[in-house]
Image (tube, rainbow, N blue to C red):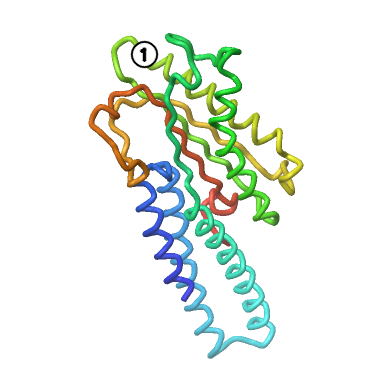
Amino acid sequence: MMKKEIRYTIKQTTEKVKCNEVDFQVANEIIDSLTATIKHMDTLMATSARLEKKGTREEVIIFAEHVSVVVISAMRILKSLCDLYDISTYSQFETATFFSADSSNIPPEKIAEARKAIEPVAQRIVRFLGDHPRQRFVAVITCSSTLVDQELNFKLCQGRARSVTNLLVELIRSNEEFIPKPNWIHYNIKCGAISEEFPYCGRKKHHTPEDNHRSMVSLNWNLLPTSLHAGTFN
């Protein structure tokens, strides 16, 4: 039953990548970890069969305790991923919401508008952390600004992405009273620039080809249990 749940989560992870809701590199880490867990479960089953035939009472008890720890950890992580996949973790914003032309810094006159745009994302993250008080998380935040013409160079777009992620982290930390253990959160920030079209995955009803050439900021976040991020459930 547990292996079936893990395989289903792997399938969900693949689907989330298609919608830009899980970063490609992060998805590979999740899938590698889940695949390793399936192999670990197979090893546990083989060990259980051996102990059932030849194991001492003490060996059986110790093994049962180990299996219990592994299963509880796996169930907790699978629940976290399931809850994460039920939330929208991908957002796009007009670049003009945050920046003046040829600038990578959010000017004072746009701070209020920028905070208003990012606040719902921060609140989703804070609520998720509040709903999972017993877990340590790696907050993987990926932000990119689109390259729509020659004038918007990579350095400028990367700087804009960094400004947006800094604002998001600032808003999360300003709500730390609602996070059970703020020191259990480690931030992994990735900023860049991309020129390809973004898949909308049904999020926008009236998408036109012109939308692909608008200057946008794309934001993606995932909260991964640290034990999963490290590569194993055990």
Quadrant in which the C terminus is drawn: bottom right
Q: Residue at x 45, y 44 (%)?
A: 26
Asked if residue 25 lies left or right of residue 179, the reply is left
Mark 1 — residue? 153
Asked if residue 182 lies left or right of residue 10, the reply is right
Residue extending furthest front? 206
Asked if residue 15 lies left or right of residue 75, the reply is left
Q: Position of residue 5 (x, y in %)?
A: 45, 68
Q: Give the answer, above or below, for where 75 lies relative to 223.
A: below
Q: Position of residue 171 (x, y in %)?
A: 64, 32
Q: Position of residue 195 (x, y in %)?
A: 30, 25
Q: Quadrant of residue 204?
A: top left
Residue extending furthest bottom? 53
Q: Residue at x 58, y 13 (%)?
A: 109
Q: Residues within 10 Å of mark 1 (few under 14, many from 20)?
A: some
| Residue 198 vs residue 109, the one in the foreground | 109
Q: How many numbered badges does the structure rendering display? A: 1
Q: Give the answer, above or below, for where 164 lies relative to 134.
A: above
Q: Give the answer, above or below, for where 162 lies relative to 234.
A: above
Q: Secondary structure at mark 1?
A: loop
Q: Residue at x 45, y 37 (%)?
A: 91
The amino acid type of the residue labelled 1 equals Asn
Q: Residue at x 69, y 34 (%)?
A: 173
| Residue 63 vs residue 134, the one in the foreground | 134
